[in-house]
Image: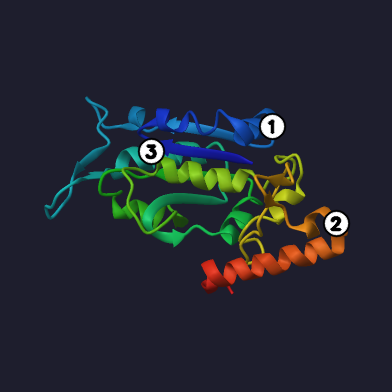
């Protein structure tokens, strides 16, 4: 998979892709992430990428020309399955969406800033709009990193145990069951006996029951 991320603040995306699972995925050549600085595409003489809104009002708007020029240049190099704009008013990111995106070959991600981007970009370039929640951040870089993390970890070979992702919360519309590790007894707080029984079928049944109960209590909307 190849992911291009367009941003006016590239340093915000350096750390997320330089550690842990995402770094491992790149090292294994399972994914390549290219962070593109929008500033060089800005309008001369000061590489301007934003301007005041027509009709007045507070806040700046990201201009159409720098972004359009950047997108068009990237599209000359490869064909994109999706051009995604990270925005609070996009569709809410779900595990189902991540599962689908993880099967794609080429993705472009646009990080918004200020009051947003010129609407004509959304009308003529963007193919998908995604939000990570009903709140507003100062820019699209952190949401882009969140989405990419959720996608990349699903690519076969990224996780050491590929079945791990299949048992994550939301994969089957249930939250994950409680998990435990050693010691089996800490200050009198004991691990459920069933998990120490070695009876895998009964353990699986217990985990499903626990996942169902936890979902009923915490996220009944998933059922």
Q: Distance between the residues labelled 2 and 1?
A: 40 Å
Badge 2, how many Cα within 10 Å: few under 14, some, many 20+?
few
The structure residue drawn at horizontal position 71% and vertical position 31%, both measured from the top left corner, is 28
The residue sitting at the front extreme is 188
| Residue named by callout 2 | 197
> Which quadrant holds the N terminus?
top right
Residue 22 sits in quarter: top right
Task: Give coordinates of residue 182: x percent, y percent.
Answer: 73, 42
Task: Give coordinates of residue 98: x percent, y percent.
Answer: 58, 54
> Which quadrant holds the C terminus?
bottom right
The relative height of residue 125 versus residue 206 in the rendered view (above or below) is above
The relative height of residue 93 versus residue 222 in the rendered view (above or below) is above
Of mark 1 and mark 3, the one earlier in the sequence is 1
Judging depth in this view, the residue of 91 and 133 nearest the camera is 133
Query: Can residue 37 be seen by looking at this rendering?
Result: yes
| Residue named by callout 1 | 29
| Residue named by callout 3 | 69
Of mark 2 and mark 1, the one earlier in the sequence is 1
Task: Give coordinates of residue 108: x percent, y percent.
Answer: 50, 44
Query: Can residue 79 be seen by looking at this rendering?
Result: no
Of mark 2 and mark 3, the one earlier in the sequence is 3
The reply, left or right, for residue 29 in relation to residue 83 is right
Judging depth in this view, the residue of 123 and 16 nearest the camera is 16
The reply, left or right, for residue 32 in relation to residue 86 is right
Which is more foreground, mark 2 or mark 1? Answer: 2
Which is more foreground, mark 1 or mark 3? Answer: 1
The structure residue drawn at horizontal position 69% and vertical position 36%, both measured from the top left corner, is 30
Judging depth in this view, the residue of 52 and 194 nearest the camera is 194
Residue 198 sits in quarter: bottom right
The structure residue drawn at horizontal position 44% and vertical position 54%, both measured from the top left corner, is 132
């Amino acid at each position: 998979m190849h992911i291009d991320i367009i941003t006016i603040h590239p340093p915000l995306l350096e750390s997320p892709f330089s550690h842990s699972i995402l770094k491992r995925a790149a090292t294994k050549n399972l994914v390549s992430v290219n962070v593109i600085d929008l500033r060089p595409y800005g309008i001369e003489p000061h590489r301007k990428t934003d301007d005041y809104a027509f009709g007045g009002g507070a806040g700046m708007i990201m201009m159409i020309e720098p972004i359009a020029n950047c997108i068009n240049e990237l599209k000359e190099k490869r064909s994109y399955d999706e051009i995604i704009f990270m925005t609070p008013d996009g569709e809410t990111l779900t595990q189902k969406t991540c599962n689908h995106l993880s099967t794609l070959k080429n993705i472009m991600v646009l990080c918004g800033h200020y009051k947003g981007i010129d609407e004509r970009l959304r009308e003529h370039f963007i193919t998908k709009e995604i939000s990570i929640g009903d709140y507003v951040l100062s820019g699209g870089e952190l949401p882009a990193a969140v989405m990419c993390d959720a996608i990349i970890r699903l690519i076969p070979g990224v996780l050491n145990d590929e079945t791990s992702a299949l048992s994550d919360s939301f994969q089957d519309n249930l939250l994950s069951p409680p998990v435990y590790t050693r010691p089996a007894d800490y200050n009198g707080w004991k691990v459920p006996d069933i998990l120490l029984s070695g009876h895998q079928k009964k353990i699986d049944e217990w985990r499903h029951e626990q996942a169902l109960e936890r979902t009923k209590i915490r996220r009944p909307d998933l059922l």
